[in-house]
């Protein structure tokens, strides 16, 4: 009896010793660093610190995303990952992303006629437009929101993650939201979920397919209202999508490809229905329809001002007071030339569209009355007055001896 007990104790002791040895081996293996980490701990220690702070470091090595680069002698083998690479593990999110507007960000930038003529650092150097629009480059850059090398999903769930790109001159949506009642409640109670965030409305349940009903340009076709459709046609000419005679141009294909406008009623309605359902999680159907409808009507009013402004400048072309630049396909104002416009009156026209019209409708849909009115609608009216006065002055200057 005693001998069997002794044998049992001995066996248990041996098993425990074996388990301890296994644990030590496992720890040793865990601590064994890849060649990438050994090198980059000296070369880029901040990158390694970020990487080790994230969960991906627990299951992946660097070469899974960056390829077979092994050192300074084969740097040409280094690969920068895209959404396609991320999709190997995150297939649902990558597929959703590919169907949304963020995947088209680079195409949307390249659809602008003067992009190729900007200084290199602004586009390719990522110091201007390219810095945000890179999100859609080479199939998509997930680290625009899940910053490298931690790649923390919790970071991308915070509204601040959107602030880098959705701020400033022509798209200050974060600024509008953060100072709206929605944004204020979230800042006062960041963990209660009482108010919607950017992600709640635009990435419902983590869906990476980001798309809006009106699109970047707040243009949809067709319009049932004949007066609005007439104004819209003038705006489309000013955007270079239609020629001065109203015929489609090659730029229409670029607009379609980048999805910066909604070109069928069904496409617009599908996105509106999605947003209505989201708003109805907190508000009544009547309340939602009233507020979204008010935003639609503000676009109608803004388009009325915009069409007059474009028409006023177009007459200066007709009268040959303004001559087209060599890069302009038509003798007609081209808003998408942006700040490359050569006359002060055209600079005002571009600012009226890209800054103040944008803020008029963006402020309305992001529930920020002050932004909508004093940073959007009011400046639009001033712009129109300035354009009228400038046009008359240019005519007077031409007549002067």
Image (cartoon, helix red, strand yellow):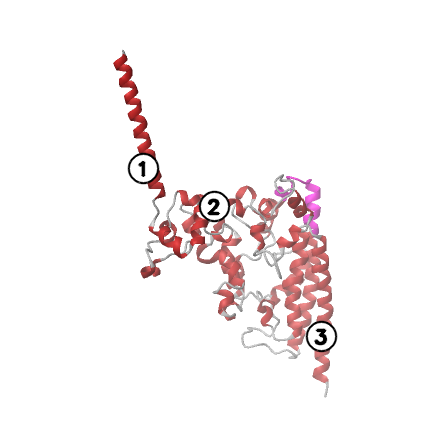
Q: CA distance from mark 2 to mark 3?
A: 51 Å
**Whether residue 150 is situated above or below residue 400 in the rendered picture:** above
**Whether residue 242 is situated above or below residue 391 in the rendered picture:** above
Closer to us: 175 or 328: 175
Closer to us: 374 or 41: 41
SS majority, magenta: helix
Closer to us: 244 or 191: 191
Residue 128 in the figure: left or right of residue 349:
left
Precedes in sequence: disc 2 or disc 3:
2
Closer to us: 308 or 396: 396
Q: Residue at x 68, y 41 (%)?
A: 285
For label 3, count other residues whose C-alpha is less than 10 Å away and answer few (under 14), some (14-19) or many (20+): some
For label 1, count other residues whose C-alpha is less than 10 Å away and answer few (under 14), some (14-19) or many (20+): few
Image location (x, y in percent) of residue 254: 51, 62
Quarter of the picture containing the C terminus is bottom right
- For the question of whether residue 376 can be seen, the reply is no
The magenta span reads 276-294
Image location (x, y in percent) of residue 103: 49, 54
Q: Identify the element where label 3 is drawn.
A: helix
Residue 126 in the figure: left or right of residue 356:
left
Q: Identify the element where label 1 is drawn.
A: helix
Precedes in sequence: disc 1 or disc 3:
1
Are discs 2 and 3 less than 8 Å apart at CB? no
The disc at residue 390 is: 3
Q: Which corner quadrant of the image does residue 237 belong to?
A: bottom right
Identify residue for label 2.
93
Q: Which corner quadrant of the image does residue 6 belong to?
A: top left
Dot in front, 1 or 2: 1
Image location (x, y in percent) of residue 341: 60, 72
Identify residue for label 1.
25
Q: Residue at x 70, y 60 (%)?
A: 375
């Amino acid at each position: 009896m005693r001998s069997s007990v002794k044998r049992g104790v001995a066996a248990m002791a041996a098993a425990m010793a074996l388990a301890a040895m296994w644990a030590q081996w496992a720890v040793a293996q865990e601590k064994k660093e890849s060649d990438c980490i050994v090198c980059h701990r000296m070369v880029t220690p901040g990158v390694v610190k970020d990487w080790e702070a994230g969960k991906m470091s627990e299951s992946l090595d660097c070469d899974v995303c960056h390829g077979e680069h092994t050192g300074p002698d084969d740097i040409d083998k280094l690969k920068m990952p895209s959404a396609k690479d991320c999709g190997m593990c995150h297939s649902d999110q990558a597929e959703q992303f590919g169907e949304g507007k963020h995947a088209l960000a680079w195409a949307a930038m390249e659809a602008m006629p003067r992009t190729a003529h900007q200084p290199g650092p602004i586009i390719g150097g990522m110091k201007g437009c390219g810095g945000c629009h890179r999100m859609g480059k080479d199939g998509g850059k997930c680290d625009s929101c899940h910053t490298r090398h931690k790649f923390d999903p919790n970071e991308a769930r915070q509204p601040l993650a959107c602030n880098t790109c959705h701020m400033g001159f022509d798209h200050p949506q974060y600024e509008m939201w953060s100072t709206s009642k929605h944004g204020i409640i979230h800042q006062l109670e960041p963990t209660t979920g009482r108010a919607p965030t950017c992600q709640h409305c635009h990435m419902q349940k983590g869906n990476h397919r980001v798309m809006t009903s009106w699109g970047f340009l707040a243009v949809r076709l067709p319009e049932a209202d004949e007066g609005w459709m007439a104004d819209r046609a003038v705006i489309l000419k000013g955007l270079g999508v239609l020629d001065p005679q109203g015929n489609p141009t090659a730029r229409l294909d670029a607009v379609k490809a980048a999805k910066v406008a909604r070109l069928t009623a069904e496409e617009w309605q599908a996105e509106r229905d999605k947003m209505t359902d989201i708003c109805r999680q907190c508000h009544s159907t009547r309340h939602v329809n009233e507020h979204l409808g008010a935003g639609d009507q503000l676009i109608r009013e803004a388009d009325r001002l915009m069409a007059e402004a474009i028409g006023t400048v177009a007459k200066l072309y007709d009268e040959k007071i303004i001559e087209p630049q060599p890069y302009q396909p038509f003798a007609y104002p081209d808003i998408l030339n942006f700040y490359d416009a050569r006359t002060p009156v055209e600079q005002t026209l571009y600012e009226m569209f890209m800054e103040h019209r944008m803020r008029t409708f963006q402020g309305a849909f992001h529930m920020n009355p002050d932004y909508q009115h004093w940073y959007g609608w009011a400046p639009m009216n001033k712009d129109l007055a300035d354009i009228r006065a400038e046009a008359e002055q240019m005519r007077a200057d031409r007549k002067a001896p």
